[in-house]
Image: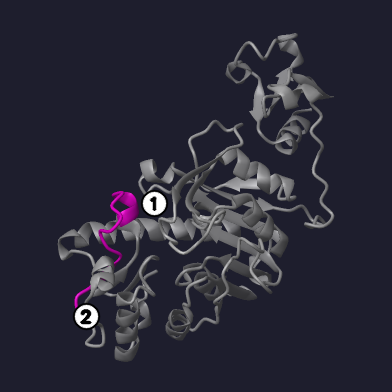
Amino acid sequence: MDLRKYKLTKEQLEKARELACRGLICYQPFIFSDDLITGAGYEFARIAEGAGLVYSKEIPKTITIDDSVRRHLIDPSILADFKLHNEQLRVLYESMIDLVYDKVPSPEDLTFADIGSCTGYFPLSLSKRGVKEAVGFDSVDYAETYNLMNDILGTNADFRCSPYRGDLGAIENAGVFDVAISIAVLVHLSDPLQHLAFIGRIARKALFVWTWTSEDEEDEMVIHFKSVNRYYEHTKFPFCFDVMQISPGLLKRSLELMGFTEIYELENKPNGMPDYWFKRHRGYLGIRPEGVTAENFVPERYTAPLSFALGKAPPHLVETIGRYNLISYSGRYYGIPHALGQLEIDKIKPEEMEGVLMDISLTALRKKLKSLA
């Protein structure tokens, strides 16, 4: 977010510089002046953790330069690329907000919660766009940062220093909102499904989640734990696994099982983050149909034979829609045209055959087939 047009006062700029050196404005992309820029874009794009998150031409006299401060400051020699990649990160962030605005009806009339908000890029941006309420939650106290940003932008984003607790599977007294946002949080949790269930409960209408995902096939339901206490050294088992990859199929299916059956995947922008980095992540916006809530949603039953529990179930006819047979097999759903005759789809790759439709979502495929009927 480029704040230069807001003509920061000397006091605002000095406060921003101090907070940046303290690590309370660093991860998210902000330009305060030509001499003060923050963001993790360079570390992300170059896979260079530790390269730095802050460019500051000056260091406030109130700041003691120690290892913590040095970790945040970049080497000025990388400044050009640092600016480039943080602009790419800004484009990514704005594309997330744009997706919500494009797909969720009347967002300006809704309330938003950002779980793990960091310095508040998303609540601030949403407040700037005029939403009814925008609240950020984090385990780190970013109150000073929010106060400064609201002062600069003329916004009223709210901050609550309330952590997600794995032992509770919730944030205490979080409340309920129309839309919940979770960006780069799931990757640091040992209980991703429990956390998804929590944000699904507090979101009435829609949920946007973006995280590092695995390279498993779309039909695989898998969680990979990569590291123990890498970032959070004081957490105890079973909440000590703080680098986690969830498979795209499991992430998407989790949204569906909570009633967010209208799902849109975030796409990269031409001037966004490099494709090799973007493709390591998935972002899904899930929207509940009108009238559906976390309490009244009843997921569709899995109708395959019991042999599924003993291994891979044989192909199973779910129903016939128009000129298609809707077949369930190996975690995927296939629309097989009658014209192809009887196929042994457990011995071929039906998705490669002309006219065959495939989706991991029964609801989505049924909708496609009905539109063709």
Q: Residues within 10 Å of mark 1 (few under 14, many from 20)?
A: many
The amino acid marked with disc number 2 is: Ile
Q: Quadrant of the N terminus?
A: bottom left
Horizontal side of residue 178 vs 47, given as left or right: right
Residue at left offset 59%, top offset 52%: 191
Q: Which mark, residue 272?
A: 1
- In contact (CB < 8 Å): disc 1 and disc 2: no
Q: Is residue 57 magenta?
A: yes
Spatial distance from mark 1 to mark 2, Cα to Cα? Answer: 31 Å
* Residue matched to label 2: 59
Where does residue 79 sit, x and y in percent of width and height? 20, 62
Visible residue check, residue 104? no
Outermost residue on the front side: it is 237
The mark that comes first in sequence, 1 or 2, is 2
Magenta segment, principal secondary structure? loop
- In percent of width and height, residue 94 lies at 47, 60
Above or below for 265 versus 110: above
What residue span does the magenta drawing correspond to? 43-59
